[in-house]
Image (cartoon, helix red, strand yellow):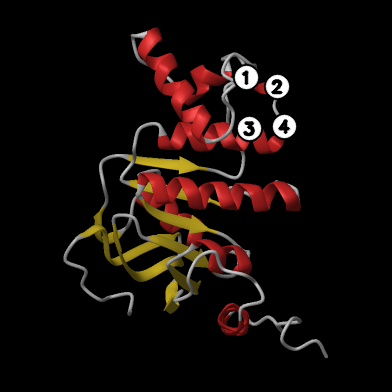
Amino acid sequence: MSPSADIPDAVVDIRNVRRAFGDRPVLDGIDLQLRSGEFVALLGPSGTGKTTLLRILAGLDSADSGRVVVPRARSVVFQEPRLVPSRRVWRNVVLGGHSPRKLRSRADAALSEVGLSNHGSAWPVTLSGGEAQRVALARALVTEPGLLLLDEPFAALDALTRIKMQDLVAELVELHRPAVVLVTHDVDEAILLADRILVLNNGSVELDVPVDIDKPRPRTDPRFLELRALLLDQLGVVDSVTNPH
């Protein structure tokens, strides 16, 4: 599928989006369409526009030109959980509102989905890094967003916690079915989670490739290794798994 292919039922429709900071173009005519429930991962060297594109999708930044159509309900999970330390965990999940009983019920349901049923009354300072990021994920999904934006949400976690969080995100996306855009530098993570992977470079989409591998996706699957080698080559990295010497 090319990045400019028309998708009749697209919930995200980005056409010829451009963004520059001073004289430096960061996005140079980006096209992107997503269906509801579709998971797209963005790869690319630092400074190629991945986070800028995500911020435009989130409404945190504006394009200089081009078409940007996104669902009204959007949520973002950042690398840091960004919890409010003076509010208990359940209050961090459902910020605002005027009916504490209903809010607590919604928060408890969301916390149960991320495996934190008994943490609603805890303070954020008592949570581990993985638990805090689970709270951030519960907060992002409690509003049933049409678009979920993930900005390197596992980068600060240890390897084991990262794997658990990847599995959790896959389960919750399957349950809630938002369109998802993940910014990551981890090629394996992109292959494990995404339906499509885009490689950005110099503000443009250099590669837009589907991930045609049934889930769960074992890293030893020849198709996994082939796609991994393709993506690493596109990123200018030698694949030590398939080229050990």
Mark 2 to mark 3: distance in Å?
9 Å
The three-letter code of the residue at mark 4 reads Ser
- Residue at 61%, 85% (x, y): give it: 233
Mark 1 to mark 2: distance in Å?
7 Å
- Residue at mark 4: 128
**Callouts 2 and 4 close, C-beta under 8 Å:** no
Relative to 199, residue 171 above or below: above
Is the residue marked by circle 1 packed among few (<14), some (14-19), or many (20+) residues within 10 Å?
few
Residue 125, numbered circle: 2
Q: Residue furthest left?
A: 8
N-term mark: 3 or 1:
1
Residue 99 or residue 202, whichever sits in front: 99
Residue 207 or residue 214, whichever sits in front: 214
Q: Secondary structure at mark 3?
A: helix
Residue 132, numbered circle: 3
Position of the C terminus by quadrant: bottom right
Mark 1 to mark 4: distance in Å?
13 Å
* Badge nearest the viewer, 2 or 4: 4
